[in-house]
Image: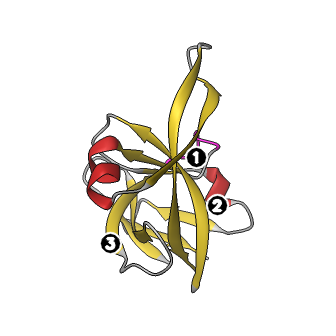
């Protein structure tokens, strides 16, 4: 799986997600966030557009130490040739985030010289 490093230094990749295994996928661009230990964070606007099904809320500790309950949803991610059910945390941000929950077991290379991202 390949991506790019953009002009702001962000490691970006395109992922295909879908509400259910039977629906057509939608491609989204995600920012690889190695400080996030979950799977995906997706802006609420994209979640609403896709019609993702809400699941239970998730308790989380933020970087400032505060604990909050976050809305979560489920989706199907096309992940290395397989359909994988993942938990999506909703936010009000602009860019979806891919966390280390999906990176475990893979090799991530962010090449800032050649502005490419490689995930194997």
Disc 2 crowd, CA 10 A, few/some/many (<14, 14-19, 20+):
some
Tell me the residue at 72%/60% (across/down): 104
* 110 relative to 30 in the view: left or right: right
User: Could you say where residue 93 lies in the image, as x and y percent from the top left?
Assistant: 32, 37
Q: Splitting the image into 4 quarters, where does residue 82 fall?
A: bottom right
Q: Nearer the viewer, residue 1 or 80?
A: 80
Q: Nearer the viewer, residue 30 or 59?
A: 59
Q: Which mark is residue 26?
A: 3
Q: In terms of secondary structure, what is the magenta stretch mainly?
A: loop
Tell me the residue at 59%/60% (across/down): 86
- Nearer to us of marks 2 and 3 is 3
Q: Residue furthest right?
A: 105
Asked whether the residues under the numbered discs 2 and 1 touch, taking CB atoms below 8 Å apart as contact, a structural biologist would say: yes
User: Could you say where residue 28 lies in the image, as x and y percent from the top left?
Assistant: 33, 64
Q: CA distance from mark 2 to mark 1?
A: 9 Å
Tell me the residue at 35%/51% (across/down): 47
Q: Is residue 35 above or below residue 68?
A: below
- Nearer to us of marks 1 and 3 is 3
At mark 3, the secondary structure is: strand
| Disc with the residue nearer the chain's start (2 vs 1) | 1
At mark 1, the secondary structure is: loop
Name the residue that disc number 2 marks.
103
Name the residue that disc number 1 marks.
34
Q: Is residue 63 above or below residue 104?
A: above
User: Could you say where residue 73 lies in the image, as x and y percent from the top left?
Assistant: 50, 49
Instruction: Report the quarter where the C terminus lies.
Output: bottom right
């Amino acid at each position: 799986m390949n991506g790019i490093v953009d002009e702001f230094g962000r490691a970006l990749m395109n992922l295909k997600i879908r509400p259910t295994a039977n629906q057509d996928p939608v491609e989204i661009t995600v920012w690889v966030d190695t400080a996030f230990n979950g799977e995906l964070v997706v802006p609420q606007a994209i979640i609403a557009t896709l019609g993702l099904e809400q699941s239970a809320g998730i308790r989380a500790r933020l970087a400032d130490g505060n604990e909050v309950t976050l809305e979560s949803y489920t989706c199907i991610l096309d992940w290395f040739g397989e359909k994988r059910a993942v938990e999506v945390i909703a936010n009000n941000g602009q860019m979806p985030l891919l966390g280390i929950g999906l990176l475990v077991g893979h090799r991530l290379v962010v090449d800032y010289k050649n502005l490419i991202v490689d995930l194997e």
